[in-house]
Amino acid sequence: MDTQGIHIHNKSGKPDNIVLKEVMTEEKCAEIEAGLPSFLLGFFRYLKGNLLPLSRLAYLRDIRFFLDYLIHETDLTRAENIRDIKQAEFAGIKAVDINIYLDYLRKYKVRQGGGVYVYHNDNKSLARKRSSISVLFKYLYRDEMIEKNITDGFDPIRLPKAGDKEIKHLEENEIMLMLDAVASAEGLTKKEKQYWAKTKLRDRAMLLLFLTYGLRLSELQQLNVSSFNFGRGEFKIFRKRGKEAIMPISDTVSKALKAYVDGERPAPAAAAPGDPDADALFLSLQGGRMTERQIRQLVKKYTSIALGTGRDEGYSPHKLRATTATSLIERGHSIFDVQELLNHDNITTTQLYAAHRKGAKRELVKELEWDEV
């Protein structure tokens, strides 16, 4: 979305770029709502009052996709445009129709730009999309816009139990291989080395922030130069649900950031006065705030070198977050302290990393070596 013409008058205490991101999310929600049937206006207000902007946006996108499916894949509506779908047509939708839709979502094709794209959804994604539709139909029933609550007939979607899935993270030796690659360009292609020569200090600082603090991708991407107070040895991050957190700056991270800011960070691209991205910490070679996609590709590149895989098989920033958790737990730190550092809402999330602690079973068995008498 083009941010030109958006002027921020910010007295919230949050950085302008954080406020701008919230405004842009609200604008995206409004754009989707404008294209949906008018009888859902009350539902839109319900979402706005009960969900955070990013969650609300995800729900609206799911519902828009469902309505498009009704038009192009079923005979449940006579509308040719989403906005023309009638409230009365919803009364004819049964639980079996939703179950067919959920089965459709497992694997479907979309023709776009002369090509055919095949989409797959795992059970976790299906469960979220099922939730979006359930919330919609429960609201319509509650407000007497449909006569029956059909959600009880939706097929359950089995999610893997906590601990069923192996948690992917870098081992200690792989962390060192990754940091060595940033320092020496070992494993980079000839073209990648050309970029590396201009960004190696930035790349190292980013990876160290991920590894040291277990930051989420959005938390790192939104960091500003003014987020850091080196005199007090701390920096501020903005987490999910608008939470703020003050973090201590480690010596390693402090040195890496100062080296980048003083020796490599390019001048920000020319921008209008008050541009919230003029203060961005991590800049692209073009002088703009790095996007989440650019950061994700950077992490995949360096982790793929450490793992000895192709670039596409490299790890995401979220797996560096897992690396932070498992590394701290393996060093004997309390899971409650790790929970606080990573901002996990529930301690059971942190416990998953403890359950996957490398060598735990081997250590337990060694405690019960029974020598022959």
Image (spheres, grey):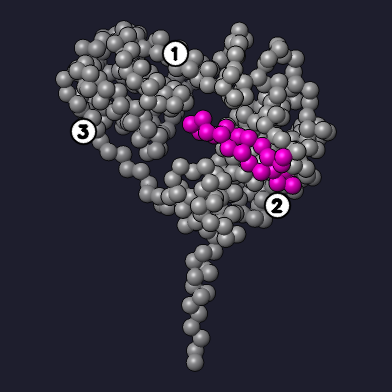
Element assignment for label 1: helix
Q: Residue drawn at (21%, 16%), measured in percent from left and top?
A: 145
Q: Is residue 258 left or right of residue 79?
A: right
Give how far apart the Cα atoms at labels 1 and 2 are.
46 Å
Name the foreground residue: 90 vs 236.
236
Which residue is disc 3 drawn over? Answer: 152
Which residue is disc 2 drawn over? Answer: 176
Closer mark to the observer between disc 1 and disc 3 = 1
313 within the magenta span: no
Identify residue type, mark 1: Ala
Closer mark to the observer between disc 1 and disc 2 = 1
Q: Is residue 27 left or right of residue 215?
A: left
Q: Is residue 133 left or right of residue 193?
A: left
Circle 3 crowding by C-alpha within 10 Å: few under 14, some 14–19, many from 20: few
Q: Disc 1 or 3, which lies upstream in sequence?
A: 1
From the viewer's perspective, is residue 307 above or below residue 110?
below
Identify residue type, mark 3: Asp
Circle 2 crowding by C-alpha within 10 Å: few under 14, some 14–19, many from 20: few
Task: Name which quarter of the figure residue 260 lies in.
Answer: top right
Q: Which residues are magenta?
A: 232-253
Q: Residue drawn at (41%, 9%), measured in percent from left and top?
A: 34
Element assignment for label 3: helix
Q: Disc 1 or 2, which lies upstream in sequence?
A: 1
